[in-house]
Image: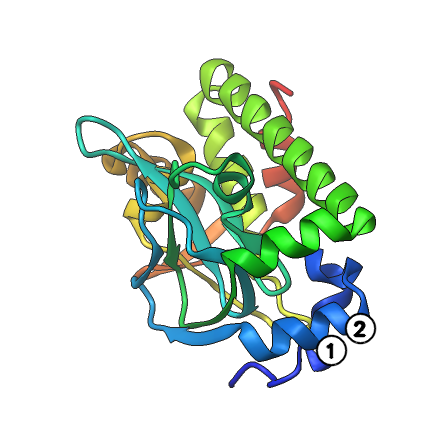
C-alpha cells in the first residue's frame, strides 16, 4: 500500500494532528511531503539525530524506544496509522531523545521541518492540538515511571499484553495473534527477556494466552485486565 499523493485523501487525516490543517496547508504539504516504505526492524529516525521533519504513519506499527548506557532497550510507546512521530524534538528544537523503529512493514510520510514550523506559527488550531499532544506525552511518561517503579513484573506483563491486544486489534472481528518478539515484549515491560519468557510460560499454563513462535494469542482478555489493575 502506498500513501496517497494528496494529504486530503488520507483515510487517517481526521484522527491525525494534520487534521487541524487548512485545505491550503494540506495542499502545501502534499507537494512537500516525502513518503517512504520501511521494512520490519528498519529505523525511521535515530536517537541523538537532528529532526528532519514530522513523521506521519500511513500504514503499519512503530515502536519508539531508547537505549540505556548498558545497551538495554526500553520501549516508551507504540504508534500506528494516523499517529505522528518526532514532534517533541521538533518543538524543542533539539535532537531526538529516542528512536522510531518499524515493528511491522510500514509506510510513513515525512513533513519537512520548515513546513511544520510554518503551519505551527500560522495555524492556531494546529498549535493547540500540538500542545495537547505534548501534554499527553508528558502525562504518559510520568505514568510509565510510576508503573515501572511500583507495579510487580507480573502485573506489568498483563498490562503490556492488554496494550498490545488493543494496539494490534484489527478492524474486523477475525481472530488474530500479536506479532511481538520476546526482546520487544521485555523492552515494553522494562524487564529482562528471561523474566518475560518465564512469566509468559506461567500465563500460558494458566490458560490466559497461547504462544507459537514469536506470536501471542490472548485467550482471556478480561482476566489479564484484572491482573494488570491489581496495583493500579
The disc, 1 or 2, on the residue closer to the chain's N-terminal end is: 1
Q: Is residue 187 visible?
A: yes
Give the quarter of the figure containing the C terminus.
top right
**Is 51 or 141 nearer to us in this picture?**
51
Q: Is residue 206 visible?
A: no
| Left or right: 183 in relation to 92 | left
Residue that appears at 59% across and 71% down: 175
Residue that appears at 64% across and 27% down: 139
| Left or right: 10 in relation to 138 | right
Residue that appears at 76% across and 62% down: 21
**Is 106 or 154 nearer to us in this picture?**
106
Q: Tell me the residue that label 1 is attached to.
A: 8
Q: Tell which residue pokes out farthest to the left in this image.
A: 70
> Dot 2 lies on which element?
helix
**Residue 199: percent from left, percent from top:** 37, 35
> Dot 1 lies on which element?
helix
**Residue 12: percent from left, percent from top:** 70, 69
**Residue 93: percent from left, percent from top:** 48, 38
Residue that appears at 48% across and 40% down: 89
Q: Tell me the residue that label 2 is attached to.
A: 23
Tell me the mark number nearer the camera, choosing from 1 and 2. 2
Above or below, comparing residue 104 to residue 140 in the picture = below
| Left or right: 189 in relation to 138 | left
Q: CA distance from mark 1 to mark 2?
A: 8 Å
Disc 2: CA contacts within 10 A as few (<14), some (14-19) or many (>=20) = few
- Which image quadrant is residue 72 in? top left
**Residue 203: percent from left, percent from top:** 44, 41
- The figure's colour scheme reads rainbow
Tag count: 2
- State yes or no: discs 1 and 2 in contact (Cβ < 8 Å): yes
Amino acid at each position: 500500500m502506498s500513501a496517497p499523493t494528496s494529504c486530503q485523501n488520507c483515510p487517517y487525516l481526521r484522527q491525525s494532528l494534520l487534521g487541524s490543517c487548512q485545505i491550503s496547508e494540506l495542499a502545501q504539504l502534499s507537494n512537500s511531503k516525502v513518503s517512504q516504505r520501511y521494512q520490519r526492524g528498519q529505523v525511521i529516525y535515530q536517537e541523538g539525530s537532528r529532526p528532519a521533519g514530522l513523521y506521519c504513519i500511513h500504514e503499519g506499527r512503530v515502536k519508539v524506544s531508547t537505549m540505556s548506557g548498558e545497551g538495554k532497550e526500553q520501549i516508551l510507546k507504540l504508534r500506528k496509522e494516523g499517529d505522528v512521530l518526532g514532534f517533541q524534538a521538533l518543538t524543542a528544537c533539539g535532537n531526538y531523545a529516542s528512536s522510531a523503529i518499524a515493528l511491522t512493514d510500514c509506510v510513513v510520510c515525512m513533513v519537512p521541518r520548515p513546513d511544520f514550523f510554518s503551519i505551527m506559527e500560522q495555524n492556531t488550531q494546529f498549535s493547540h492540538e500540538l500542545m495537547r499532544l505534548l501534554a499527553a506525552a508528558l502525562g504518559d511518561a510520568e505514568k510509565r515511571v510510576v508503573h515501572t517503579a511500583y507495579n510487580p513484573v507480573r502485573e506489568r506483563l498483563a498490562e503490556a499484553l492488554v496494550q498490545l491486544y488493543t494496539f494490534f486489534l484489527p478492524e474486523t472481528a477475525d481472530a488474530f495473534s500479536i506479532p511481538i518478539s520476546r526482546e520487544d515484549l521485555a523492552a515494553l515491560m522494562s524487564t529482562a527477556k528471561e523474566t518475560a519468557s518465564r512469566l509468559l510460560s506461567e500465563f500460558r499454563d494458566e490458560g490466559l494466552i497461547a504462544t507459537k513462535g514469536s506470536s501471542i494469542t490472548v485467550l482471556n482478555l478480561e482476566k489479564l485486565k484484572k491482573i494488570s489493575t491489581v496495583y493500579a
